[in-house]
Amino acid sequence: MLTALEKLRQGTYDPASGQIRWWTYYDRAIMAAATLEHTYFAVPKGQGGKTLADTNMPNAALMPQGHNFEIHAIEAFYVADGAKTQAEYQNVIDMMRDTYLQFEIEALANQLQLPIQVLFGNPMPQVVTGAAAGDQVTSRAQYKGMWELPVPIVLAAETSWRITMTHTVAVNASLADDELMISLVGALVSMGG
């Protein structure tokens, strides 16, 4: 006799067993000057002013009953609130160099801890200078990075967890209102029909 999970592995949906699908949970933090930490997935959709544009988590850092989530990758998106000057681009680079992501599950040891500069990889902001003294060059910064996990992180049903982004140096005022979004990508299993 096949278990519910074994039946799901034969197809993505079984009315009696549930559904397995490729999924992403995401959450957005708005940067604030002098901030040292941002916590992700702590406020669910529909609370604290969070809309579907901000997060799709139904519960505050808690997997819903009857679900488990096998995370295969973590994505990060940085979107500037407006155009950046050369000096402000340097502030973005400095922030990425001085910030790390930490993923914790309940009372377990850290599941992941890495500098976000590693998460974003090589497509970092480029310093742009004018052709002549006094030229002003501005551009709006938008970056995406992805870290594929060599070993998936599995969040079981009703497991609490948290992701924090810690800045070892306070966020520069020129980055206020910029967005830093985290997305967890993997297989979501919903049990039951």
Image (spheres, grey):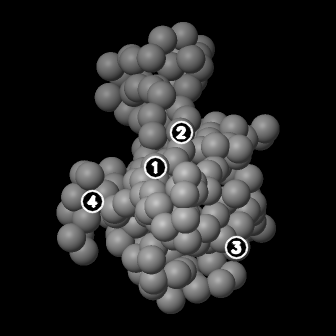
* Residue carrying label 2: 185
Comparing 1 with 60, the one in front is 60
Comparing 69 with 141, the one in front is 141
Q: Amino acid at mark 2?
A: Val
Give the alpha-carbon distance from disc 3 to disc 2, as whole Å. 25 Å
* Residue carrying label 1: 142
Q: Amino acid at mark 1?
A: Gln
Crowd class of label 1 (few under 14; some 14 to 19; many from 20; radius 10 Å): some
- Secondary structure at badge 4 equals loop
Crowd class of label 3 (few under 14; some 14 to 19; many from 20; radius 10 Å): some
Which sits earlier in the primary sequence, circle 4 or circle 2? 4
* Residue carrying label 3: 98
Tell whether 79 sits left or right of 153: left
Residue 83: horizontal and vertical position, in percent? 37, 60
Residue 128: horizontal and vertical position, in percent? 57, 54
The image quarter containing residue 21 is top left
The image quarter containing residue 29 is bottom left
Residue 110: horizontal and vertical position, in percent? 75, 65
Q: Amino acid at mark 3?
A: Asp
Quadrant assignment for the C terminus: top left
Which sits earlier in the primary sequence, circle 4 or circle 3? 4
Give the alpha-carbon distance from disc 1 to disc 3, as whole Å. 18 Å
Tell whether 160 sits left or right of 14: right
* Residue carrying label 4: 45
- Residue 111 in view here: no
Q: Is residue 106 above or below residue 141?
A: below
Find the residue positioned furthest to the top: 10
Give the alpha-carbon distance from disc 2 to disc 1, as whole Å. 20 Å
Q: Going 77% across and 40% down the picture, which residue do you hit? A: 151
